[in-house]
Image (cartoon, helix red, strand yellow):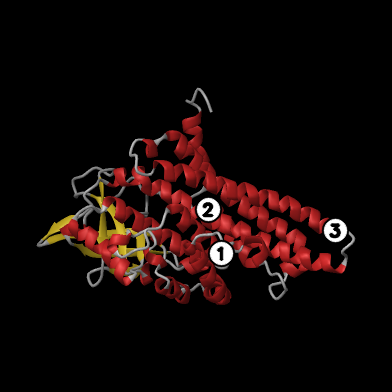
Amino acid sequence: MDTLVAPALGTGEIQRRAWQIGTDVAAPAAPDVDEQARFPSETVEALREARLLAALVPRELGGLGASVSEVAGAVRALALHCASSALVLAMHSIEVASLARNGTTGPLQDLLAEVGERQLLLANANSEVGLGGDVSRSFCALVPKEGGYFLDKQTLAISYGEYADAIIANCRRSPEAAETDQVLVVCRPPTLLLEPTSTWDTMGLRGTCSKSFHLTADIDPKMIFPVPFSTIANHGAGQLRQLLLSATWVGLAEAAAAHAHAYVRKAARKEQDKVLPNAIRFSELVLRLQESRSLLDSCTAWYEAVKDDDEAIEDVALAVALRNLKVGASRLAVECATSALTICGIEGFRRDGIFPLDRVIRDAHGGLVMVSNDRQIQDNAAVLRAWKDI
């Protein structure tokens, strides 16, 4: 499979590290991670050892000072071997980037340095029961108590929450605040308590362990972001979320293509004088793969160009493009996975076959519902109907 998608010699060091972890650690563990719906602990430990959990931490704070495109490449490289592991890296990196950009106070910068030094794993608890996935509103609020605040939140999902070193959550600024008047806070042990309120027995992406939780925590006033949550979401965090999660769907398309490529090459060695029908189908699959990669590359370049400009990063055109990236990359992952199955035939259909595709197909379908494509399209429709030009 390496001939189609393995990082070339000219590829950056961060992507090469992620690829090596994928081949040496994530891929061997992936079947058991999927079967048991367990956290990919060995892969995350390898990411720690390679210092990739601090990829987006500035160098002066002990990180790698990587670019977003480098981290997106690392997510893609990991996703080809284990989509759940790639999502853990992506979701963690989103929180690290948000902390680096918006955690401008001394204590929050100290936390960022701790991520760099100790390779802490960060998780997110923004979704809340009863809001249908709308993170721009909160029911829960910071309740004043002696020495700080108390947070009590019924979360819709916290991916790998039980394994994170800290959880970053949104909530109302106070019990009297409006639902949209939100702040971002850091929840840490020993006062952070998580009570599972659901299981995680899903079709795919089983290693993300995205259970619902009843979260309670004492909040240190120093661990409240100084910037309103709406500003954080609009000035980079929401955009980066679209990019890095979509990198996972591109990696899954590459995984499907890699299986199909290996199958076609094997068949070609037997009948070297013929262009077999499967080879023609594979040519069509590569077209879909190129579309997926191009979507990610163009949006990543756009984001990199405007990420430090608060006005440009809120450009409605960029928001539309990023929603299209999410919809397009997730759909193309499913198309590539299905096409690979038709190419590999029974060898892809059998779980004990030479080119098993069941996990890739199941994980790819997760991209369609992990933030519903219908919501993305509806949001774009609301914007596009008012545009004079496209």
**Could you tell me which residue is drawn at 18 percent across and 57 percent down?**
106
> Residue under circle 1?
204
Quadrant in which residue 114 is drawn: bottom left
- What residue type is disc 2 on? Val
Give the mark toward the camera: 3 or 1: 3
Instruction: Report, in whole angstroms, how far the alpha carbon at label 2 lies from the one at label 3.
Output: 35 Å
Q: Tell me where residue 44 appears, x and y as whole percent.
A: 44, 72
The residue drawn where x is 55% and y is 59% is: 10
Residue projecting furthest to the top: 388
**Quick check: 268 left or right of 350?**
right
Mark nearer the N terminus (1 vs 2): 1
Q: Which mark is residue 276?
A: 3
Viewer-nearest residue: 356 or 130: 356
Q: Which residue is mark 2?
A: 369
Numbered disc 3: secondary structure: loop
Where residue 136 appears, as percent x and y from the top left, is: 34, 45
Q: Position of residue 86 (x, y in %)?
A: 49, 63
Residue furthest out toward the right? 273
Element at label 1? loop
Where on the picture, by quarter, is residue 151?
bottom left
Image vertical order of residue 292 relative to residue 118, above or below? above
Q: Closest to the observer: 65 or 263?
A: 65
Give the residue drawn at x 53%, y 28%: 390
**SS at circle 2:** helix
Which part of the image, by quadrant, shows the N terminus?
Answer: bottom right
Q: Amino acid at mark 1?
A: Gly
